[in-house]
Every structure is written in structure tokens, then in C-alpha cells.
Image (spheres, rainbow, N blue to C red):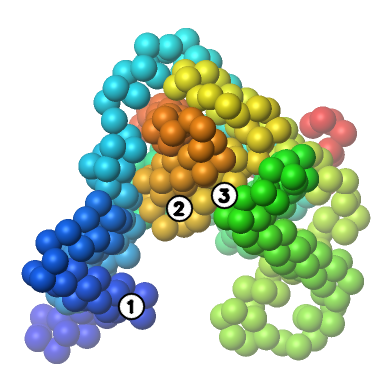
Amino acid sequence: MSNSDNNSERYVPGKFEWAVLVLDLLLFLLLSWRLVDPLFLDGQLLPSMALALLPGTLLTLLRKPAISTHRFCFALGLLVFLVVNGTINLSDIKEALARWEWVALGIAIMCFQIITGAWRWVLILQGQGIGLAFSTSLRLLTTGYFFNTFIPGSTGGDFYRIYTVAKGNKKLIAPVTTSVFLDRFLGLPTLLILVLAGVFMNIEFIRSTSQFLTIAKGYVVLALGCVLFFTALFLASFYLADRLRSYNFKGLLGRALLQAVESIEVYKGNKKILFYVLLISILSHLGTLLSFICFSKAVGLEGVHLSLMLFLVFAGIMVNYIPLAPGGAGQGELAFAWIFSLATPAFPENAHRAAVMMLCFRLGMFFYGAIGGVIYGVRHEEISLDAESEPEVESTL
């Protein structure tokens, strides 16, 4: 192979990678002030982030893919920062493990999230006219936990589900992709509903704290934006699909939008599926709340009543779901420590305990991810589908 062929195949970093490189250089430039003042930014997050982003920055300079490295090192940098500044310490972890029965119960309850998720996906696929057994959905979702937990910097579990179900039939790619998209994003409105419920149940407390008031306003704006987006998408799919098809989209984004609209259009005659999916999502999130209540018993959290727990837990989970670090590692612990310490200033130890509470939740994710890895390793049979069946929600419910 000639040198020109090698150069043509050389990886070209994207704008995001170059932006992170510039950010990292600025962070190191800022830290150079330590030559004058050794205590500058001492104990702050920026030094950890500068070092965490360095490996990916070097890969960008070498014209190598760096996004996954950035995400993995970002998570590692956050966790190192939390350990170094004492937010996560061994004594708190030992105290939680000493109450192992609460940790075990919380992890057991987390299984409810997988069960409801499998049930929800079966219904969404039924709306696409695709029949998938609940047991198969449960197996694929658990295997997806393995990819999402142990493969840094990816949403491999979603791609695995799409590939496995649509394998061998290109006509299924669009509806199955849409089903995974809906499975992911229909959970967001229900999560926002629960956060807003927590806001209104603690409105006087939130008004008394300027930081929480700012957070609450942000969630209200996000909720309204989410409602407008989904309303526009579903109205366009239900009532404007023919008009959109007449525009003959040629661009990649336009064709993807049209495919999404056509895939969602099939729910027009069976809107109750969407209602059931939203209801199941709420039940799933409430199961998550119950698992966190168990973890709060394990870590000895103090001064947090149930309605405040509702707001704080789901506010922290939303930060954890921001796709920065793999699985939100590090950012979730940091968010929980900050939110709970801000909410309970009379109990300063709650910052450490809340971070360990999130670690308990992550331990559960690793546990179910490991189970998914075992399933992936020992079971590779073909997926049996009934792609011609009509939706039969009543029989599933």
C-alpha cells in the first residue's frame, strides 16, 4: 500500500476533539499561575480535569480517535477528585457495606427497572407491528446493560438491540431504531414529571434557597421544551406525514426525520400504547426512587424526608444521565454530593453519604451489567420475530 493510501485513511479529528484540545490547553495555561501562587485553585476541580483531558488531547495531536478516551478519563478524573478531596472516603463505604442488607435490597429492587424496561420495549415494538417475546426483550435489555456499563464511551447497548432484532432484514432497521429511540426518550418526560412533582411538593423550601430556585427554573424550562418537542414530533407524525413525504427529502438529516415520522405514524391508530409506555416509565422511576431510599438507609442519610428525597434523587439522576462520562460515572457522585449538601446544611456528612449512595446504585448497575455479560457470552441463538403481527396491547397487559 502506498503512502498516499495510508494518508487517505488517516483519522481526522472532529470539531469536538479539537475544542477539547483547546480547552485543555487553556486549563493548563490557567494552572501555570501556580508558578506564582502554589495554592492557586488548590483543592478545586480544574486541575483534575486538566490532567484527565490530557490523554485524549495527545491522541488528537496524533490524529487518533479521542472521544471515548475523553469520556473515560473525564469520569476517572471526577472520581479521583472526589476521593482526594474526601467526598468519597473508605470509612463511608465501609459504613454502607456494614448495612449490607439495605444495599442488597436496593440492588434487588433495581431489577424492577430492567423488568419494566423490557415490558415497555415489547409494547413499543408491538406498535411497530413487530412481535418480540418478553423473555427475549429482557435478555437483550440485560445484555445492553453490559455494553453500556463496561464499554467506555458508547451507547453500545442500544446498537446491540437494534442490530440483534433487525439483523437479516433491512426493512426492520427503521422501525426498530425508532423503537429504541422512543424507549430512551419517552423516559425523559416521565422523569421530568417526577422532578416537577418534587419541585411543587417542596416549593417553599426551594424558594428559600437561591441555588435550588435556579435549578427548579431550569427544570421547568427543560420540561416545557421537552413537551413542545414531543408534541410537535407526534403531531407531525400523526397528521403531517403525507405532506412531509411530498417534500422528497434528500439530505441525511431530512431522510432520518422522515423515517422517524413514518415509524411514529403507526401509533396513530393505537395511541394507548404510548399511554401505557409513559405509565410504565413512571413505575420504573418510582422503583429507582425506592432503591435509593434503601441506599440512604445503608449510608445513614439524615434530615431528608420522602418528598424532598423525590426531588433530590431525580434531580441528581438527571445530571447523571447527561452523556459526558460513561454511565455518568463521577458526575453522578459529584451531583449527589453537591445537591444533598446544599439541601441539608445542618448535616454536612450528607455530602459524603450521598456520594456513596450513588456508588451503591452504580454497584447495582455493575452487578446487572455483569449478568448481561454472562448472558451475552453463553447465549447467541437467533431472535424469533413476528414482524407481520398487528399490535395486541390487551394480550400483553
Q: Which mark is residue 155?
A: 2
Q: Label 1 near label 2: C-beta < 8 Å?
A: no
Residue drawn at (62%, 73%), measured in percent from left and top?
256
> How dense is the environment of label 3, judged by Cα within 10 Å: few (below 14), some, or many (20 and up)?
some
For label 3, the SS is helix
Query: Distance of mark 2 from mark 3, alpha carbons?
Result: 17 Å
The x and y percentages for residue 44 are 28, 55
Of residues 77 and 85, the one nearer the viewer is 85
Of residues 130 and 140, the one nearer the viewer is 140
Q: Earlier in the sequence, mark 2 or mark 3?
A: 2
Residue drawn at (10%, 85%), measured in percent from left and top?
2
Q: Which mark is residue 182?
A: none
Identify residue type, mark 3.
Answer: Met
Residue drawn at (32%, 18%), measured in percent from left and top?
94
**Quarter containing the N terminus:** bottom left
Residue 52 visible in the displayed image = no
> How dense is the environment of label 2, judged by Cα within 10 Å: few (below 14), some, or many (20 and up)?
some
Identify residue type, mark 2.
Answer: Thr
